[in-house]
Amino acid sequence: RLLAAGDRPLAEIAAACGFTHPSHLTRHFRAAFGGPPGAWRTAVRG
């Protein structure tokens, strides 16, 4: 939801989700969804 809504930077979203570094969020996101969060955000916004 945080990625799809608004333009919050990935670092801010990662911190809000409890990750100590944005790369940790990216690694987990890629494993769960098959791609990086930025690409997903772009696709959702269409």
Image (spheres, rainbow, N blue to C red):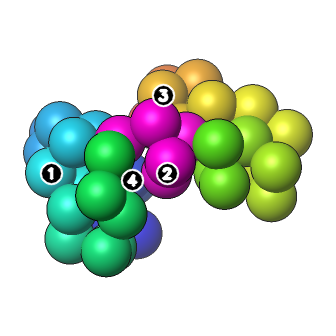
Q: Residue at x 30, y 58 (%)?
A: 20
What is the three-letter code of the residue carrying label 2?
Answer: Leu
Q: Nearer the viewer, residue 30 or 2?
A: 30
Q: CA distance from mark 4 to mark 2?
A: 15 Å
Mark 3, residue position: 38
What secondary structure is marked by label 2?
helix
**From which residue to which does the magenta span run?**
22-26
Q: Which SS class for mark 1?
A: helix
Mark 2 or 1, nearer chain start: 1
Element at badge 3?
Answer: helix
Q: Which three-letter amino acid code belongs to the residue tagged 4?
A: Ala
Gap in Å between the C-alphas at discs 4 and 3?
10 Å
Give the amino acid at mark 3: Gly
Which residue is identified by label 1? Answer: 12
Indicate left or right for 4 with 27 as reference: left
Kind of residue at badge 1:
Glu
Of the pair 9 and 26, the residue shown nearer to us: 26
Relative height, residue 20 to residue 11 (above, below):
below
Nearer-N-terminus badge (1/3) = 1
For this view, does 15 lie left or right of residue 18? left
Magenta stretch: residue 25 in it? yes
Q: CA distance from mark 2 to mark 1?
A: 11 Å
Q: Position of residue 29 (x, y in %)?
A: 65, 51
Gap between marks 1 and 3, in whole Å? 13 Å
Q: Tell me which label, 4 or 3, sits earlier in the chain.
A: 4
Position of residue 3 relative to residue 38, above or below, is: below
Question: Residue 4, labelled with which disc?
Answer: 4
Give the residue pinned by disc 2: 25
> Which of the two labelled residues, at mark 4 and mark 2, occupies the earlier sequence position?
4
**Element under disc 4:** loop
Residue beneath the point at 22% across and 42% down: 11
